[in-house]
Amino acid sequence: MTVNTGAILVLLLTFLVMILLRFPIAYAVALSSMFCLLYQGLPLNAICQQMVKGISSFSLMAVPFFITMGCLMGTGGISEKLIALANACVGWMTGGMAMVNIVASYFFGGISGSASADTASLGSILIPMMVDQGYDGDFSTAVTITSSCEGLLVPPSHNMVIYAMSAGGVSVGSLFLAGYIPGALLAFSLMVGSYIISKRRHYPKGEKFSLKNLLKQFSVSFWALAAIIIVVVGVVGGWFTATESAAIAVIYSLIVSVFIYKGLDWKGVWKVLEQCVDTLSIVLILISTSSIFGYCLTTLHVPDLAANAIIGITDNPIILALLLNAILLFLGCIMDMAPIILIATPILLPIATSIGINPIQFGIMMVLNCGIGLLTPPVGAVLFIGSAVAKMPMEKVVKATLPFYLCMILVLMLITFVPAVSLFLPNMLM
């Protein structure tokens, strides 16, 4: 056995064992990389060098700004206003509160960009509200956690910034535009699933549609939705970079939360910033440690070996595309989203491009696959948050989520095999 082969086995086997033993993902990535370097007899100062290199990126500065923006808007009284707007739009339908939940997640996701924040913020309001109106608790939780994945696709999503950095040379503005139609399709498919279940279980309708109420709620929510316009239009129009737009969005969010909606005072702002530091520290630790892991993979030529192995199975592009999705779905069951993007992108993106999948299209595929992974045991963070918010057993929530998994897989197949779903807006506007 050659040194390279042994190093690859040490890297991957120690990583897998630590994942199965429930090590924190950052420790698993860092320790497996360290063991790999020791096996090769390389100096350990490469660890520090690669960690610093991994987070020394101007484009990466957009991530803390988008996280701060989401925290400010999420705790600044925005949730209730977006729920009211969604209710004015779709609350009149059969299973109205389920529809409200899904549409509100589309709006809120465009502000927070986080499925976890969506579930925690909207779920704490909507799940009890749905139960009080006669909806089953497991159904309410399933709708909440699955619709939260819309926020991963709808800009500004900091995970798309991480993907753009990992893929190299991919436009953040194009990724932002590419997420709108898939996010809307995901919302539509979940609404169809909710409607069918609501009809069968005789869930109630809301109040009749009122154009006057819709315009009133839109005028109230306009200041929150304008944050998305600032980011997307600014980046797509070339007025400023993703990092600059994120910084402007933070200032705007602060003004809206404190002075317009008055959902935060200055003491509350400091508490929000403390939460941002906690979240950001987790994200940056994952990025820095994943940089070491990526360095080991690259020096050992693992991406080339993996690409040759996968392409060696078959040369059928349809089967290869399905295989890429299967790999990402499996990784989503055992890993969190950011490390999957950082580790898997250099390995799988060349395979995707070799069968004609555009890097932007693959980015949307990867984000949705990882989003589904957030809802699957044993490591599904959003699944755990939803169960905790609803105070329901995870097993019951998973059972209720099964029909919605099907809806999400159908959208994933559309994104995979119909490139226009994700590429239409970038091609038209960029």
Image (cartoon, grey):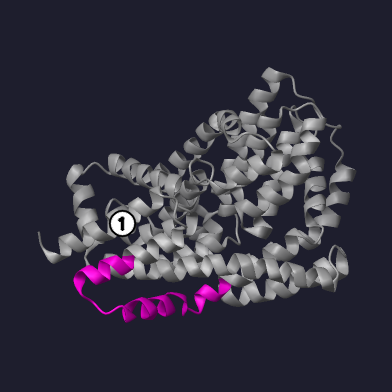
Q: Quadrant of the N terminus?
A: bottom left
Residue range (magenta): 33-62
Magenta-span inclusion, residue 242: no
Classify residue 40 by image quadrant: bottom left
Residue at 61% over, 51% down: 115
In the picture provided, is 279 more to the left or to the right than 419? right
The outermost residue toward the left is 1
* In this view, 146 is above or below 131: below
Counting from the top left corner in percent of width and height, residue 159 is at 52, 60
Magenta-span inclusion, residue 60: yes
Q: Main secondary structure of the magenta part?
A: helix
- Amino acid marked by disc 1: Thr
* In this view, 347 is above or below 44: above
Classify residue 241 by image quadrant: bottom right
Counting from the top left corner in percent of width and height, residue 200 is at 67, 18
Counting from the top left corner in percent of width and height, residue 180 is at 58, 52
Where does label 1 land, which residue? 14
